């Protein structure tokens, strides 16, 4: 057959199809090769089919050799009985017999998924195995949508509800057959709806889904794709091998849609109309997904994702109850005989009997004919009993209801410190309830900026996620609450929500409402309960949130020279400012006592100006982030630019006269004594008691800031930025009224090369460095200079050396000799003939001892 022959003629192709006959004009050799090629393809396909059949038969024979009962093997026998068993093991639908199942399969109209959808199904099943529980949320959400549709239709067409007025969702687990049923009484689907809705997906969404999936770098990123692009129903295949959808629409008969993720079929339900209206999704669960058949697992999933669905969700569960059952006939005869014998023994009474006694006897007889039995009762249990409190009118909700909702929502034992319930409208509409807890979360600043689950996102009362990094800013991560929006699509995951433009609008409104809630807290609660727990968060907010900086500034509290016990707000400080005061004065340090004695606040406090004391490390950062408050700029009194505001013309003239008087001294300090240490020397207007102080430039580091930067855990030793600020030269301000400064001026006027004046200037500078909060670069040099000043003040010669310590060698030697003598006396003398040394050796040792003693 496969060997070409030159003897072939056109008569041999009489049975060849017509389109082959048309090639008679082609050369004989070409025609031969074409025929041989086509016949070879046909034979090869037949051979492949035979080989598959042969392999199946070999596999069946191998299985049969292992199985004891070949009739029960799924692959070893092809009998009709075995086929029936396989059909019986398929998904069991209520009221559908084996023959009806066979009829259903024979009459089913099979369809193949579109190429894109089929590809997507394989990717879902093979790749997205994390977060499989999401399938139940999607099925319940679809059911809720179907119920919403029929409810809206019933508003205009009351006959739409028909004989099924109850709008419910029911979940039933068939553990025996490993099938999970989710049934709703929604709008249902027609045959065309089943084909179009379940067999196709919008190409734009699918293409984006496939591109995102193929670009995913990890299992975690891939798991986030579920529900992101409208693949909700198809998430059923994460946990099931086969999905059967039974649906009844008012405009069509009841149909069954069946799929194994490779293809699907649609057929009319041979049972007829069993649903009345609605849809049942039946999942043949995989072995690893059998946990979803447990009632507790299903309850937890419903409460986690769907507890606030508008429609009731019922779960088919069992419980043990004690019931009264009638006794059997044999059990009834025995007590009856006993009663008859007792009646014979009793004396006859009158014909008339009391009616009350007769009734009591009848009741006793009835009770005696029943017994208590414990039985397992199956019934529908309502799972989503919690109602979304945020959907109710604010006026109808009591404080107790808010507290109970907060406790159940956050699992906290204490009620919230504050709450706000609002509805936002405009570009996006959503409802929300926010709470402030009584205590800060444990380790709040150790995990500052990390993901929290305190804000839960709901879309149409369906829980989507609580894993948002940008829903609330970091400084408000302690706020608890819920957000429910109808404007965002349901099938979205956290990644899409973070990129959604409406999320920025939601975030903006949430932050403003949270700050308003905190602002409206009563003064006592705010100062005694809120500020000790969350005060640092408000200061961090000033640094991080530029948009709400003005709102946050009104919430800040600081220590002040006005009151040694109570904290003050910036608004209260501004109210107490002097008439011509244009700046808000503050100074930063380690504690209040240190700041009260700082040289920078001496004149301010003496003149009655109020100064804010910043004692926490974050305080100076926060104030520097505030350009102004209520039109008043902030002034660090440890930096240049201090203006008191009450300076008259006479005071200015006096200050100019002092500057001219001490001009020679300031020039000498800058050019000679402290040439490489200071930027310049000026006459101060802020000192009263201290001789001098070291003042930073307007954009330099204060002593407190330098101390904080050096204490950073991750600070680099040779960081160029830090070195630049630390090595900046400061301004030395001198007090013209201090006697040391006056004496120094006299010495400089007499002799600018006076060493004593140079030493005095250097010591004054280093003292000012320490008092201004900075650290000395060379502390040993400072100590040596202080020692020199002490020698001069006590008339001790500068060249006089320290007395050397006396040597104690003689005393130590004498002590050793006495110790040796004592040890000699304590040694026992050897007995004669035992332990005696030779005379020569003994003599030598005596001679050595004598010589040693002479040396000592």
Image (cartoon, rainbow, N blue to C red):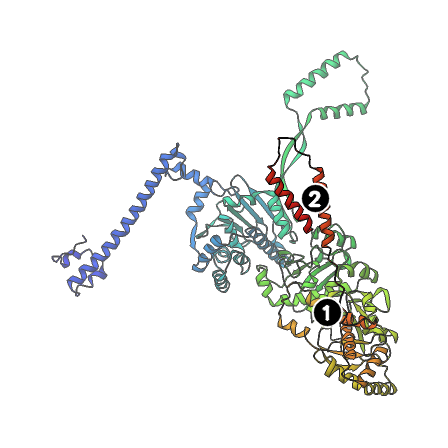
Give the structural element (helix, strand or loop) at label 2.
Answer: helix
Identify the residue shown where x is 43% and y is 54%: 111
- Say if 694 sits above or below 178 in the image: below
Asked if residue 582 lies left or right of residue 33, the reply is right
Asked if residue 285 lies left or right of residue 379, the reply is left
Q: Kindly tell me whether residue 823 is visible in this rendering.
A: yes
Residue closer to the observer: 705 or 107: 705
Asked if residue 852 lies left or right of residue 753, the reply is left
Q: Residue 263: image x %, image y %?
A: 43, 53
The residue identified by callout 1 is 775
Give the structural element (helix, strand or loop) at label 1.
Answer: loop
Q: Residue 115: image x %, image y %?
A: 43, 59
Residue closer to the observer: 731 or 826: 826
Residue 820, which numbered label?
2
Residue closer to the observer: 658 or 514: 658
- Say if 821 sits above or below 398 in the image: above
Residue closer to the observer: 840 or 593: 840
| Residue 553 location, quadrant | bottom right
- How dense is the environment of label 1, judged by Cα within 10 Å: few (below 14), some, or many (20 and up)? some
- Say if 287 sits above or below 492 in the image: above
Q: CA distance from mark 1 to mark 2?
A: 57 Å
Q: Residue 471: image x %, image y %?
A: 65, 63
Q: Residue furthest left?
A: 7
Disc nearer the start of the sequence (1/2) = 1
The number of callouts visible is 2
Q: Residue 546: image x %, image y %?
A: 69, 71
**CB under 8 Å between callouts 1 and 2?**
no
């Amino acid at each position: 057959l496969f060997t070409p022959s030159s003897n072939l003629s056109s008569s041999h192709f009489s049975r060849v199809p017509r389109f082959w006959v048309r090639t008679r004009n082609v050369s004989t050799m070409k025609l031969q090769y074409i025929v041989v090629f086509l016949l070879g393809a046909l034979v090869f396909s037949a051979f492949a089919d035979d080989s598959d059949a042969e392999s199946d038969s070999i596999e069946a024979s191998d299985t049969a050799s292992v199985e004891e009962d070949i009739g029960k093997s799924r692959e070893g026998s092809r009998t009709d009985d075995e086929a029936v068993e396989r059909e019986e093991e398929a998904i069991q639908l209520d009221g559908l017999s084996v023959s009806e199942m066979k009829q259903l399969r024979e009459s089913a109209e099979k369809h193949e998924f579109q190429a894109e959808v089929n590809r997507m199904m394989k990717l879902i099943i093979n790749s997205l195995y994390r977060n499989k529980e999401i399938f139940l949320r999607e099925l319940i959400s679809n059911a809720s949508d179907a119920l919403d549709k029929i409810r809206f239709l019933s508003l205009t067409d009351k006959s739409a509800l028909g004989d099924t007025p109850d709008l419910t969702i029911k979940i039933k687990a068939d553990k025996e057959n490993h099938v999970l049923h989710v049934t709703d009484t929604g709008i249902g689907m027609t045959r065309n709806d089943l084909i179009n809705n379940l067999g196709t997906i919008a190409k734009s969404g699918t293409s984006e889904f496939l591109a995102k999936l193929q670009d995913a770098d990890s299992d975690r990123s891939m798991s986030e794709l579920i529900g992101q692009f409208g693949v909700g129903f198809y998430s059923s295949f994460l946990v099931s091998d086969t999905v059967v959808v039974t649906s009844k629409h008012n405009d069509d008969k009841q149909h069954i849609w069946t799929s194994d993720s490779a293809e699907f079929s649609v057929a009319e339900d041979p049972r007829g109309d069993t649903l009345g209206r609605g849809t049942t999704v039946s999942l043949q669960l995989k072995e690893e997904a059998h946990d979803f058949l447990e009632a507790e697992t299903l309850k937890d999933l419903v409460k986690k994702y769907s507890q606030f669905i508008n429609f009731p969700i019922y779960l088919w569960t069992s419980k043990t109850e004690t019931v009264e059952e009638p006794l059997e006939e044999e059990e009834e005869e025995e007590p009856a005989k006993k009663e008859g014998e007792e009646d014979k023994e009793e004396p006859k009474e009158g014909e008339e009997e009391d009616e009350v006694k007769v009734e009591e006897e009848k009741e006793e007889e009835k009770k005696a004919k029943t017994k208590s039995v414990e039985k397992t009762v199956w019934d529908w249990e309502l799972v989503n009993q919690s109602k979304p409190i945020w959907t109710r009118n604010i006026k109808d909700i009591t404080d107790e209801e808010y507290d109970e909702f907060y406790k159940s929502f956050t699992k906290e034992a204490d009620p919230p410190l504050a709450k706000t319930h609002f509805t936002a409208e405009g570009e996006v509409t959503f409802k929300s309830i926010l709470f402030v807890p009584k205590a800060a979360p444990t380790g709040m600043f150790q995990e500052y900026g990390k993901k929290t689950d305190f804000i839960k996102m709901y879309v149409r009362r369906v829980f989507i996620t609580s894993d948002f990094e940008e829903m609330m800013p970091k400084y408000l991560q302690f706020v608890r609450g819920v957000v429910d929006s109808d404007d965002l699509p349901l099938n979205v995951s956290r990644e899409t929500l973070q990129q959604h433009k409406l999320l920025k609008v939601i975030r903006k409104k949430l932050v403003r409402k949270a700050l308003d809630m905190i602002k409206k807290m009563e003064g006592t609660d705010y100062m005694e309960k809120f500020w000790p727990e969350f005060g640092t968060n408000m200061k961090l907010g000033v640094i991080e949130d530029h948009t709400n900086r003005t709102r946050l500034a009104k919430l800040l509290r600081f220590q002040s020279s006005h009151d040694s016990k109570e904290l003050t707000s910036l608004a209260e400080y501004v109210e107490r400012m002097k008439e011509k005061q244009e700046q808000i004065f503050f100074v930063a340090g380690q504690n209040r006592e240190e700041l009260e004695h700082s040289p920078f606040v001496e004149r301010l406090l003496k003149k009655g100006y109020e100064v804010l004391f910043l004692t926490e490390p974050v305080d100076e950062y926060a104030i520097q982030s505030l350009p102004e408050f209520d039109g008043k700029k902030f002034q660090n009194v440890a930096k240049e630019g201090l203006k008191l505001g009450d300076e008259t013309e006479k005071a200015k003239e006096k200050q100019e006269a002092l500057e001219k008087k001490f001009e020679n001294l300031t020039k000498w300090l800058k050019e000679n004594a402290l040439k490489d240490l200071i930027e310049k020397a000026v006459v101060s207007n802020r000192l009263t008691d201290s001789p001098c102080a070291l003042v930073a430039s307007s954009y330099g580091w204060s002593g407190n800031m330098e101390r904080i930067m050096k204490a950073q855990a991750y600070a680099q030793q040779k960081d160029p930025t830090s070195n630049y600020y630390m090595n900046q030269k400061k301004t030395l301000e001198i007090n013209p009224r201090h006697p040391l400064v006056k004496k120094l001026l006299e010495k400089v006027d007499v002799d600018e090369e006076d060493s004593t004046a140079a030493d005095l200037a250097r010591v004054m500078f280093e003292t000012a460095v320490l008092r201004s909060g900075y650290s000395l670069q060379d502390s040993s040099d400072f100590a040596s200079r202080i020692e020199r000043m002490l020698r001069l003040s006590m008339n001790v010669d500068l060249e006089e050396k320290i007395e050397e310590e006396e040597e104690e060698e003689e005393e130590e030697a004498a002590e050793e000799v006495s110790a040796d003598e004592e040890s000699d006396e304590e040694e026992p003398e050897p007995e004669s003939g035992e332990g005696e040394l030779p005379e020569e050796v003994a003599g030598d040792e005596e001679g050595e001892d004598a010589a040693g003693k002479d040396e000592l």
